[in-house]
Image (cartoon, rainbow, N blue to C red):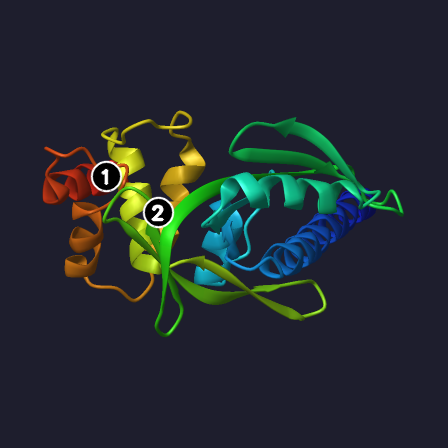
Amino acid sequence: MSLSKEAEHQELTRSTDLEKDFDIHTLTDVGIIVDEIPGSNFVVTGSYAVEALTGVPLSHNDMDSNVFTKNMWRDLPQIATQLGEQENFVLFTRTVDRLEYDVRNKSDLVTPRRLEIQFVEIADVIREDSFKFVLRGSKHSVPTVKAPLIDSTGQESFLLVKSLPYQIATWAIRISGVAENPKREVRDTDLDHLRLLLTGDFTQEDIISIMNRHPQMPKDGDPNKTLTAALNLLK
């Protein structure tokens, strides 16, 4: 590798490390703000959740998250107010169940990073080894675990993410094309994320059981056929 190419590679790596460190610290700080509100729970989703569960470093376009809450009408405005008081949070979108921010680095070493927070109403929280959120108006529940995101210095930040079997079930339903109310089209990175998740420790019975009661699974859908269709797309 030439000196110019090596310098370019080092600069790119440094930039990526700075972005990821900034994202991890942002997610940690937002989690603290959210979790201090009684009945409100912060859960990291998307590519950062995949990285936390698998330990495999990934590239990230943004920060995705959920807030599971028993009172969205109280908590969304409260969280919006608290984040609005942070000078580096610039509101991009606000709807009845979603907040999006461009988060700026005070040192300007990182370009603004997008934070997306989707609010999900729950009826109850079951506390076992970790939290399981029972969705309002249905019998569906979302199991979570604490998993670490590791910054460039090796510091671990443990955050709630949806469990490995739940994430595999979710990605399989989306990738198969049967998902009800999909939020976007399937991307190649979705296939890569499912491949990574499948390297983890799980049983097919767990996946099928979750798919049977998953909120995006059609009522007349066949979990076994859905899972097989998704796995075939990975070949």
Q: Are marks 1 and 2 in contact (CB under 8 Å)?
A: yes
Residue 28 placement, left or right of 165:
right
Quadrant where the C terminus is found in the figure = top left
Occupied quadrant, residue 183: top left
Occupied quadrant, residue 95: top right
Which residue: 44% across, 61% down? 53
Occupied quadrant, residue 62: top right
> For the residue carrying disc 1, how many other residues have a C-alpha within 10 Å: few (<14), some (14-19), or many (20+)?
many
Label 1 amino acid? Ala
Which residue: 27% across, 36% down? 216
Front position in the image: 24 or 95: 95
Q: Is residue 60 in sight in this rendering?
A: no
Residue 161 placement, left or right of 172:
right
Which residue: 60% across, 57% down? 37
Label at residue 230: 1
Q: Position of residue 214 (x, y in %)?
A: 25, 44
Q: Secondary structure at mark 1?
A: helix
Front position in the image: 138 or 182: 138
Q: Is residue 207 above or below residue 75?
A: below
Q: Label 1 to label 2, Cα distance in Å?
A: 9 Å
Q: Position of residue 18 (x, y in %)?
A: 75, 52
Q: Is residue 152 above or below residue 196?
A: below
Front position in the image: 119 or 166: 119
Q: Is residue 159 above or below residue 4?
A: below
Front position in the image: 59 or 62: 62
Q: Residue furthest bottom?
A: 129
Q: Position of residue 74 (x, y in %)?
A: 57, 43
Please name the residue that numbered disc 2 is placed on.
194
Q: Earlier in the sequence, mark 1 or mark 2?
A: 2
Q: Residue furthest right?
A: 107
